Image (spheres, rainbow, N blue to C red):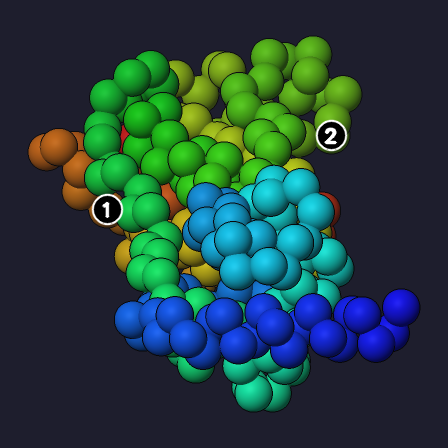
């Protein structure tokens, strides 16, 4: 069995070498990554003879193992991390889909559409929305305040919570921060950043890894 496996690996490596693929490129991917760029990687590995399971766009242990096998076959350090050198050998060009521009409009003083950009980022990462606007009863039930952007009584604000923790929460918070031009040091800070969209100003608040925000990332948007 072992012999067969190593034998077939050598054959696959030979195929890769003969095909002399054009150098590829793509974003840094490792365990925990999600999205269409992961799916493209999985399909490519599959096509090269390194099946990794479901091709589901989720970089889990199976994908990592397939990456390590591929790396060994092309004489790269088998670290399971897809960086510049591994993309080169994979021979395809993969881009992270760019999220659409931030647009003002929608409900709540136009703040809803401003928040939608973050919702698209989270959706692309497979991270769910766990809360948006809340009525008075729900505001009390979750121990929130009537000053919160979540509260339906605040007519010019919109807030959204994303259920995520750990390093994936870090990834989401950073992606949202960079999308809205929020400096990294302001993630989690209670002071907001004001952005201009479509002729209006919106105050943003990005809460993560501060009291009450270790199991979700909060983005609050308020028209000012
Ligand atoms: Zn929240």
Tell me the residue that label 1 is attached to: 195
- Spot occupied by residue 193 in the image (x, y as percentages of width and height): 33, 52
Name the foreground residue: 151 vs 5.
5
- Spot occupied by residue 91 in the image (x, y as percentages of width and height): 37, 67
Left/right of residue 131 with respect to residue 124 in the rendered view: right
Q: Marks 1 and 2: which is nearer the front?
A: 1
Mark toward the start of the polypeptide (1 vs 2):
2
Name the foreground residue: 172 vs 33.
33
Query: Total label count?
Result: 2
Residue 129 is tagged as: none
| Local secondary structure at mark 2 | loop
Tell me the residue that label 2 is attached to: 143
Q: Quadrant of residue 84?
A: bottom left
At 59% across and 59% down in the image, what residue appears?
Answer: 49
Count residues near mark 2 (Cα–Cα under 10 Å), then give few for <14, some for 14-19, many for 20+: few
At 60% across and 26% down in the image, what residue appears?
Answer: 131
């Amino acid at each position: 069995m072992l012999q067969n496996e190593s034998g077939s690996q050598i054959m696959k490596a030979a195929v890769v070498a003969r095909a002399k693929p054009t150098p590829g490129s793509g974003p840094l991917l490792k365990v925990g990554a999600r999205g269409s760029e992961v799916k493209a990687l999985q399909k490519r590995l599959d096509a090269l003879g390194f099946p990794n399971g479901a091709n589901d766009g989720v970089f889990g242990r199976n994908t990592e193992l397939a990456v390590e096998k591929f790396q060994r076959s092309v004489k790269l350090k088998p670290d399971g991390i897809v960086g510049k050198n591994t993309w080169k050998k994979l021979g395809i060009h993969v881009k992270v889909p760019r999220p659409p521009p931030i647009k003002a409009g929608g409900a709540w003083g136009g703040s809803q559409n401003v928040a939608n950009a973050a919702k698209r980022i989270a959706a692309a990462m497979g991270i769910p929305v766990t809360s948006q606007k809340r009525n008075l009863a729900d505001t009390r039930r979750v121990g929130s305040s009537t000053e919160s952007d979540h509260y339906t009584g605040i007519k010019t604000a919109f807030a959204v919570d994303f259920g995520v923790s750990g390093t994936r929460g870090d990834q989401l918070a950073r992606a949202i921060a960079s999308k809205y031009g929020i400096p990294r040091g302001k993630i989690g800070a209670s002071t907001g950043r004001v952005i201009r969209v479509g002729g209006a100003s919106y105050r943003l608040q990005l809460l993560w890894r501060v009291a009450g925000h270790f199991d979700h990332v909060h983005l609050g948007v308020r028209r000012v």
